[in-house]
Image (spheres, rainbow, N blue to C red):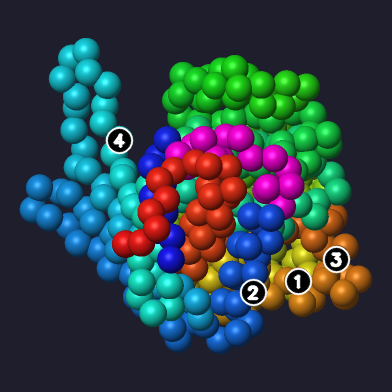
Amino acid sequence: MTFTILSDADVQTLLHNISQSDVQELASALNQALIQYSCNDELPYQPHRANVTRPNGQVSLFMPATTPSSIGVKMVGVAPSQTPPPGEKPKPALRSVLTICDELGQAVGVLNAAELTAFRTSLGSMLLYRYRKKTENIIVFGAGKQAEWHIRLAILLKGDDIRKITIVNRSSARAKDLVDSLTQSKVGSHIKMEVFEEKENGLEDLITEADVMFCTTPSTSPLFPASYLLSDSGLSKSRFISAIGSYRLDMQEIDPELLKHITNPSGPFASQVHQGYITVDSIKGCMDEAGELVAAGLKPEQMLEAGKIDGLREDEGVQKWLEEGFVVYKSVGVGIMDIAIGKSLMDLAAEKGVGVHLDSF
């Protein structure tokens, strides 16, 4: 059995050169993994995550997962905060590696997972975003890898329908760097990309005009107050919101008050939200780790896993909600997402002659 090794440079080569058809195939693989997780009773076979913090502040995260055909574990190292010496660039704060074995435990691949993680998380948002009919005006909160991949994938999938993308970030310099990088890569050359500059009522106007919001920051407070979308202008249209940046109970990207209104069957969004659902990658994961959902007091029955949506799309009401309604997607990450995308990238690497391929291991 072939053993594949993909470095960070290999993964970036693959991902930065993917076509729309490649993205659709990768999305299909990810969707099938989530269907397996949500509909085929895979939850009992998912090991618990673990984390260890050393005395010096070094954090190690271990994220194992299994499927009927694979075993995998992603290890992440988060370095303690350090100021680099003068003249030196800061070292990456986060490094990660994904090891994949077959169902018998035979190792089949090792991949640098830094770029892969940002890609697979962003692709999870695209599984629902791809149904949207109106996506002219997009806001992206954050300017890191997750923000970059949300932008890249949105343009690959629906670029002809996008007119403007605005990046909102605490550091406007970093946001400008992202815009410059995308521009130099000729990503979405027909799309107006700009960095939000703070001004009176500026953020409220930006949000009420948005068709899509991608939230990609580890924020400990809501990125905007619920009142922005409860105003007359806020209620005048539906939108798609993806929140993938917060992953602990002390973090919030979406105002819990907004989530309470969205899930209220007799609230102001009742006509825009299918049965008051918030869509999630994993109900258990979000109940354990999604700060805004827990703060809003949401119950499992108010959440709909993305892996169950394909089976509901024959319902006209569900399809209309996905295309035109108010859809909120919250993700904290599921290990099988890493396995699904890791295996797909190994196949793509073999097809394109990228990486190191050994006859045995």
Q: Which mark is residue 310?
A: 1
Q: Is residue 105 left or right of residue 55?
A: right
For the point 28% across and 68% down, which residue is it?
50
Q: Are marks 3 and 2 in contact (CB under 8 Å)?
A: no
In the displayed structure image, the side of residue 200 where residue 10 appears, left or right: left
Residue linked to disc 4:
92
Q: Which residue is mark 3?
A: 319
Which residue carries the number 2 mark?
35
- 3D distance between C-alphas at marks 3 and 4: 42 Å
Contact (CB < 8 A) between labels 2 and 1? yes
Q: Name the amino acid type tagged 3.
A: Gln
**For the C terminus, which image quadrant?**
bottom left
The span from disc 1 to disc 3 (Cα, nearest Å) is: 10 Å
**What's the residue type where badge 4 is placed?**
Pro
Q: Which residue ends up furthest to the right in the rendered image?
A: 316
**What residue is at 75 percent from the left and 25 percent from the top?**
191
Which residues are drawn in magenta?
10-24
Q: Is residue 244 toward the left or the right of residue 267 in the image?
A: left
* Along the line of sight, the residue nearer the viewer: 295 or 135: 135
Give the overall secondary structure of the magenta segment: helix
* Residue 100 found in image quarter: bottom left
Q: Secondary structure at mark 1?
A: helix
